[in-house]
């Protein structure tokens, strides 16, 4: 029983770390999306589309998608309006898979 308590504590720390990671990447996603929108308006250097998609895939997908919708940036690009929701879907599937693995290992 004592072992399970330590294991649960470990999972709580992992969850806290994951939430912090996603929060930081979400802020980065918001920042670079707004930066790219402002650069587009000013006809200046732009953030590469690959960079936007990589940040999305690394965990900033929901924040980036919402930001793009709010500021109306890249909303006419299928690569983003279909690609980012696909990334979100895959991230959800991954989290469900991790949850199933957790319950199989520790229940």
Image (cartoon, rainbow, N blue to C red):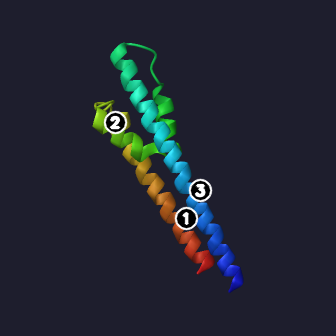
Of all residues, the one furthest to the right in this rendering is 3
Separation (CA) of disc 1 from disc 2:
29 Å
**Residue 87 in the image: x percent, y percent?**
44, 47
**Residue 67 in the image: x percent, y percent?**
35, 38
Who comes first in sequence, dot 3 or dot 2?
3
Of all residues, the one furthest to the bottom in this rendering is 1
User: Could you tell me which residue is drawn at 37 percent across and 36 percent down?
Assistant: 80
**Residue 83 visible in the shown view:** no
**Residue 46 in the image: x percent, y percent?**
45, 20
Question: Dividing the image into 4 quarters, which one contains the N terminus?
Answer: bottom right
Q: How many marks?
A: 3
| Mark in front: 3 vs 2 | 3
User: Could you tell me which residue is drawn at 58 percent across and 81 percent down?
Assistant: 107
User: Could you tell me which residue is drawn at 40 percent across and 19 percent down?
Assistant: 39
Tag 3 near tag 2, CB within 8 Å: no
Location of residue 15 (image quadrant)? bottom right
Who comes first in sequence, dot 1 or dot 2?
2
Counting other residues with Cα less than 10 Å from the Cα at mark 2, is it few (<14), some (14-19), or many (20 or more)? many
Who comes first in sequence, dot 1 or dot 3?
3
What residue would you read off at disc 3? 17
SS state under label 1 = helix
**Residue 72 in the image: x percent, y percent?**
28, 32
What residue would you read off at disc 1? 98
Tag 1 near tag 3, CB within 8 Å: no
SS state under label 2 = helix
Separation (CA) of disc 3 from disc 2:
26 Å
Q: Is residue 50 above or below residue 11?
A: above
What residue would you read off at disc 2? 68
User: Could you tell me which residue is drawn at 59 percent across and 56 percent down?
Assistant: 17
């Amino acid at each position: 029983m004592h072992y399970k308590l330590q294991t649960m504590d470990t999972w709580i720390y992992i969850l806290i770390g994951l939430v912090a990671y996603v929060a930081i990447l979400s802020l980065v996603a918001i920042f670079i999306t707004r930066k790219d929108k402002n650069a587009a308006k000013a006809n200046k250097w732009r953030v590469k589309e690959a960079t936007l998609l990589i940040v999305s895939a690394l965990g900033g997908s929901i924040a980036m998608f919402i930001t793009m919708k709010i500021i109306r940036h890249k909303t006419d690009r299928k690569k983003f309006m279909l690609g980012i929701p696909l990334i979100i879907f895959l991230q959800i599937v991954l989290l469900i898979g991790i949850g199933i693995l957790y319950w199989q290992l520790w229940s």
